[in-house]
Image (cartoon, rainbow, N blue to C red):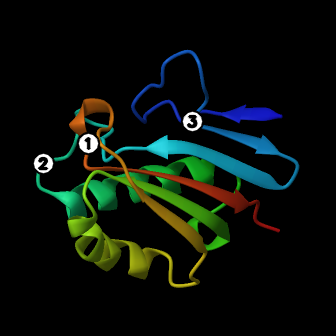
Amino acid sequence: MQPIDVPYLPPNNATYSQAVRLGDLIFVSGQLGVDPTTRRLVEGGIQEQARQAIDNIAAILLAAGSALECVAKVNIYIVDFVWLPAMNEVYGPRFPHRPAKTTVEISRLDQDALLEIEVIASVIR
């Protein structure tokens, strides 16, 4: 197992990696809509946070030898299902290949984020 960390993205705590590569699979830890420059949640609502979380995932996948097009599974944690249609407006164009997806409503996320997204992808062959 090989840890993957992207230095310019917001740092993780010492208990986990941004992603790990195991064979031909990349497991990306949950990403919030945190701007790598300010290291804070992006301003706006669910769409801005979703866009930034997906951008962060794309950067991690690139560092791991993968890409959004190689994502096979997506898990989304959202604090209110009322925002799901707006989140899907951002999500859909970024994942047109329609990977498997699970969305779960939860009561609270770190930094009071509106959503967190994690993915499993294959490496680019």
- Residue with the mark numbered 3: 18
Is 63 in front, or is 32?
Answer: 32
For disc 1, the marked residue is 113
| Image quadrant containing the C terminus | bottom right
Q: Position of residue 31 (x, y in %)?
A: 44, 44
Of all residues, the one furthest to the right in this rendering is 23
Q: Is residue 64 visible?
A: no
Provide the residue designation for mark 2: 43
Mark closer to the chain start, 3 or 2: 3
Is residue 119 among the parts visible in the rendering?
yes
- Mark 1 nearby-residue class (10 Å; few <14, some 14–19, many ≥20): some
In the rendered structure, which amino acid carries the disc numbered 3?
Gln
Residue 87 lies, in percent from the top left, at: 29, 69
Amino acid type shown at disc 2: Glu
Residue in view at x 32 percent, y 59 percent: 50
Is label 2 in a helix, a strand or a loop? loop
Which mark's residue is nearer the viewer, 1 or 3?
A: 1
Q: Find residue 101 and report its horizontal and vertical position in percent.
A: 55, 69
Residue 102 coordinates in the image, percent (x, y): 53, 65
Q: Amino acid at mark 1?
A: Ala
**In the displayed structure, would residue 85 be above or below residue 51?**
below
- Closer to the camera in the image, 6 or 51: 51
